[in-house]
Amino acid sequence: MSSDTYDDRATYRGSSYTSASGEAERRKLFSERSERVSAFRSEVGTKSDSPRPARDVMANYDESLVRCSITKPAPGVTRVYKILIDNSGSNRQIANHFRNSTNYLRVNLGLIDHDGQFTFEYFSDHCDGKLISQPIDYVSPNKEGERILTSTLHHVHDADGGDSPEAHECALWDACKINFGEATTRHLILVSDVTGHGMGMGDDQGCPNQRSWKESMDLVEATYTTFELIGCGASADVATLQQQFVTYRHPENLAMNFVSLAYIKEHQYRLGIVLNAFLFLVARHRGPQSVEGFLSRLYEKWLSDPLFGGETDRRAKEAIIRFAKYIDLQSKEKTEMMSRVLVSPTDEVERLLKEEGVFI
Ligand SMILES: [Zn+2]
């Protein structure tokens, strides 16, 4: 167990960096950050690559803060995020990763969208009985919200999923029936490695409610401001089938709103990226400054926790550059942003962007 919480290490960076006003102040913060990055870079090859000891998340458990149903957003909240996480057998590790990362999640969400509220739901398939839907009530990204998340996640159980598809059609439908309170800006983010029933996967026993995924997506269109999908499986074929969720109503959004992680072959590594892909999408809703702040923190976090020994800097840069694909900026602005994020010269950033297929 470690008492070292993520916020001890990160809060000051993110808050000061993103709230910087004025060119002189921004330059000063960038110069401080460059020094930290240089210091991390000089250490990555020498630090142990053994993972940090896991935090004792039970220390934050409080039975009175378990919230296993969705009520409504707090009064005055105008922006909410609903996150649907596929909890079937193959995705269990992603669910566990979220469970162990509530502190990281809260700190980053607090920096990115302090006034928004977030409701998570773990879903699987009809054969899982009541485990098909395991929601967590709306939380704010503050310390109480973190305790609610941690406490409730201890009551989220693993589910099996049955056939190859899961009950996306029903999870999406139900996601439109929750109470949004005063929230007029509503973001829906789906995290899954497969599709719903009737979308072309093999071993499909169908939806016992005869619900069509298309009618669910029609309802999503009428209910939510945006819909984004994180495809977290390893199969490129399944990722192609997953595209239908986005292309059915908005083929023009495919490049931006379907974040497929199928290119990451190492299972563990892919799992680690899912949570950051989610934070990235939330940051994107808050604008380019939020994206830059988040990616800058992420780069420093990876450098300070060198999972890949001497390869850490190169791999961190590559992984962060891949997010650039999903930033809606002109090439020049994008290159300049990534140059600041990675504290690297623009010609190196341009080369990396080309290598990762961001600019064709
Ligand atoms: Zn169904």
Image: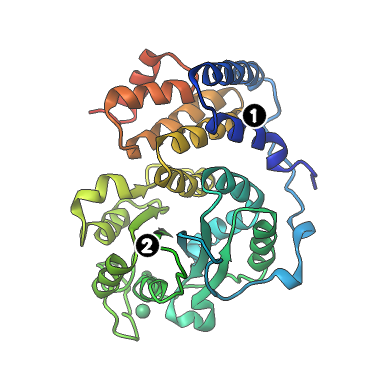
Quadrant of the rendered image containing residue 189: bottom left
Q: Are marks 1 and 2 in contact (CB under 8 Å)?
A: no
| Crowd band around label 2 with a 10 angstrom C-alpha radius: few (<14), some (14–19), many (20+) | many
Q: How many marks?
A: 2
For label 2, the SS is: loop
Nearer to me, 323 or 48: 323
Q: Residue 16: image x %, image y %?
A: 60, 30
Q: Residue at x 69, y 35 (%)?
A: 9
Which residue is under mark 2? 194
Q: Residue 144: image x %, image y %?
A: 69, 59
Nearer to me, 185 or 58: 185
Which residue sits furthest bottom? 209
Q: Residue at x 34, y 40 (%)?
A: 326
Which residue is under mark 1? 304
> How are the colours assigned in the image?
rainbow
Q: Is residue 320 left or right of residue 102?
A: left
Label 2 CB less than 8 angstroms from ligand 1: no
CA gap, disc 1 to disc 2? 33 Å
Q: Is residue 215 left or right of residue 104?
A: left
Mark 1 residue type: Ser
Q: Residue at x 64, y 62 (%)?
A: 149
Q: Residue at x 76, y 58 (%)?
A: 60
Q: Residue 285: image x %, image y %?
A: 40, 47
Q: Is residue 204 above or below residue 350?
A: below
| Crowd band around label 1 with a 10 angstrom C-alpha radius: few (<14), some (14–19), many (20+) | many
